[in-house]
Amino acid sequence: MLTDNIQNLIGNTPLLKLKDSNIYAKLECFNPLGSVKDRAALNMILDAEKSGKLKKGGYIIEPTSGNTGIALACIGRQRGYNVILTMPENMSVERIKILKLLGAEVVLTSVSCGMGGCIDKARDLQEKYKNSFIPMQFDNKANMEAHKSTAREIIKDLGDIVPDFLVAVIGSGGTIMGLSKYLKMEYPNIKIIAVEPSESRVLSGGKPAPHGIQGIGANFIPSLVDVKQFDKIIGVSTSEAIIGMKKANGDYGTFVGISSGAALMGSLKIANEYKDANIITVFPDTGERYLSVFDTNCNYCI
């Protein structure tokens, strides 16, 4: 594909049938910035431009655990905006370096404050920079609507195969809510399974707590998320997610991150319970952003 714009390369990612299973994984690491958030970032920016919320030469400010920031940094800069990102200080070194290389300013916040602290800081910065816009992925319907195209790609690639389950991890909620909406139009009987960290069962009504699965499991329920749409919510621990990441990389040849490991382990739990079910899942990002997480000094080393 020949193009003169990086944005034209977003989407149309592969759907991989994992060997010896009926699990079909959407490999979002094939997006140009390496994650599913490329779709959301582009759609939120286009929507803001259309509505007039984002003006020429302005600032994009966003609380992010990494991937949304990477996508916003690249796409925002390509479209002529300044980008400031707030994120927890425990995010991987790779993510922070990538953001800075893409031209974004990174503001780190306390781990103890979770994503709520990032949001508060972003709002403080918006007061400082008047010509600014916070996409607020956790509330932005354009985030969810970005996955109309993702669903279309899945439907096209499946052909005559009818999926029984969608299993997806939840960060902002845009991916699972968007896919749920548009896959149900084609497959009205599909069951929606949400995956959250076992250590922090917020979606299940528990209290937020620290966990090691970067990119998912915020310490609140995003407004995009309607838990009534889920047929089941299952927990995957950080240790399980790491095992899943190693399995995805070693057994299936995908080089994906820890949230993909959580998605895989959630899918395997459903596959073990429903032996002949066809399962769709999403592997959100590449594994390159997590190498420093698994050094010898890490609690979750390989």
Image (tube, helix red, strand yellow):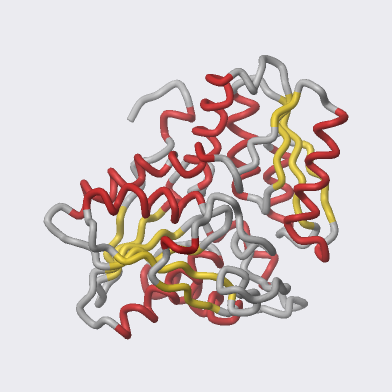
Q: Nearer the viewer, residue 299 or 265?
A: 265
- Vertical relation: 68 (above or below) 220: above
Going 68% across and 23% down the picture, which residue do you hit? 81
- Vertical relation: 54 (above or below) 155: above
- Vertical relation: 79 (above or below) 89: above
Q: Seen from this angle, which residue lies furthest left?
A: 160
Question: Image quarter for residue 238?
Answer: bottom right
Going 67% across and 78% down the picture, which residue do you hit? 300
Residue 145 shown left or right of residue 51 in the figure: left
- Vertical relation: 82 (above or below) 214: above
Residue 21, image x, y percentages? 26, 75
Count of marks overlaid on the render: 0
Q: Quadrant of the C terminus?
A: bottom right
Q: Nearer the viewer, residue 123 or 297?
A: 123
Q: Quadrant of the N terminus?
A: top left
Question: Image quarter for residue 204?
Answer: bottom right
Going 60% across and 44% down the picture, which residue do you hit? 139
Residue 132 shown left or right of residue 148 in the figure: right
Residue 157 shown left or right of residue 269 in the figure: left
Q: Nearer the viewer, residue 133 or 262?
A: 133
Q: Nearer the viewer, residue 249 or 262?
A: 262
Residue 5, image x, y percentages? 47, 24
Residue 275 shown left or right of residue 208 in the figure: left
Residue 265, image x, y percentages? 44, 76
Q: Seen from this angle, which residue lies furthest front?
A: 228
